[in-house]
């Protein structure tokens, strides 16, 4: 699948509002990829596909998730806001045949995960910091992303987890594990800097 194919699919599948967001994410992903030495075309492809199932009905998402051999449905059952990401990663992998790196970035763009690759961080942060994002904390993370993907990822996770906790919502375990992973990376980096 090419970036052009992904753009066409996103235009056909998503509402105007969602496509505008997706285009903003693609611009930010391309910019961050260039800055951090990742493939710009891979970043654009992942960005155009990241919300490909965002507007799909819950029963469709659950059907895709139940058919997956890598997603523990018990882990995400109480967090329907992230179903589109996991189902989108499965769809990108199994139906569209994209590279595992891209499918994983789509799969974890809403939650992060323990041991996430830099490319996955880049797509998560492109979604979090795209120009159309105006929620509390987006500008702060946007600035941090200019100097460190890892520090920006940690700040975004803290914001995300704090927001969910403030609403008495269920936390996706992947986000908690991603936070632990990013704290561990920060500690390692601080030891190395001494």
Image: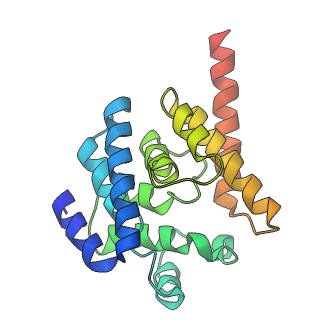
The foreground one among 173 and 31 is 31
Residue 46 figure quarter? bottom left
In the displayed structure, would residue 145 be above or below residue 135? above
The residue shown at (49%, 73%) is 84
Q: Residue furthest top?
A: 194
Compared across the picture, whether 113 is left or right of 38 comes to right
Residue 194's x, y, as percent? 68, 8
Q: How many marks?
A: 0
Residue 38 figure quarter? top left
The residue shown at (34%, 74%) is 16
Residue 72 can be seen, yes or no: no
Compared across the picture, whether 161 is left or right of 17 comes to right
The residue shown at (40%, 70%) is 18
In the displayed structure, would residue 146 be above or below residue 193? below
Describe the colour scheme in one phrase.
rainbow
Residue 28's x, y, as percent? 38, 45
Residue 120's x, y, as percent? 46, 48
The foreground one among 155 and 184 is 155
Residue 104 can be seen, yes or no: yes
Residue 192's x, y, as percent? 63, 15
The foreground one among 192 and 153 is 153
Compared across the picture, whether 82 is left or right of 159 comes to left
The residue shown at (29%, 71%) is 10
Q: Quadrant of the N terminus?
A: bottom left
């Amino acid at each position: 699948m090419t970036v052009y194919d992904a753009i066409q699919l996103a235009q056909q599948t998503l509402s105007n509002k969602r496509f505008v967001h997706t285009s903003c994410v693609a611009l930010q992903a391309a910019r961050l990829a260039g800055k951090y030495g990742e493939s710009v075309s891979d970043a654009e492809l992942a960005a155009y596909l990241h919300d490909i199932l965002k507007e799909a009905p819950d029963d469709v998402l659950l059907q895709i998730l139940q058919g997956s051999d890598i997603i523990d449905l018990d882990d995400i059952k109480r967090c329907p806001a992230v179903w589109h990401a996991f189902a989108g990663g499965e769809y990108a992998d199994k139906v569209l045949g994209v590279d595992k790196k891209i499918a994983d970035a789509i799969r974890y763009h809403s939650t992060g995960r323990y041991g996430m690759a830099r490319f996955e961080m880049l797509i998560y942060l492109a979604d979090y910091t795209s120009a159309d994002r105006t929620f509390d904390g987006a500008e702060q993370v946007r600035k941090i992303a200019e100097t460190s993907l890892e520090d920006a990822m940690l700040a975004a996770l803290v914001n995300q987890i704090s927001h969910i906790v403030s609403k008495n919502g269920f936390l996706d375990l992947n986000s908690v594990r991603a936070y632990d992973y990013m704290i561990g990376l920060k500690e390692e980096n601080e030891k190395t800097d001494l």
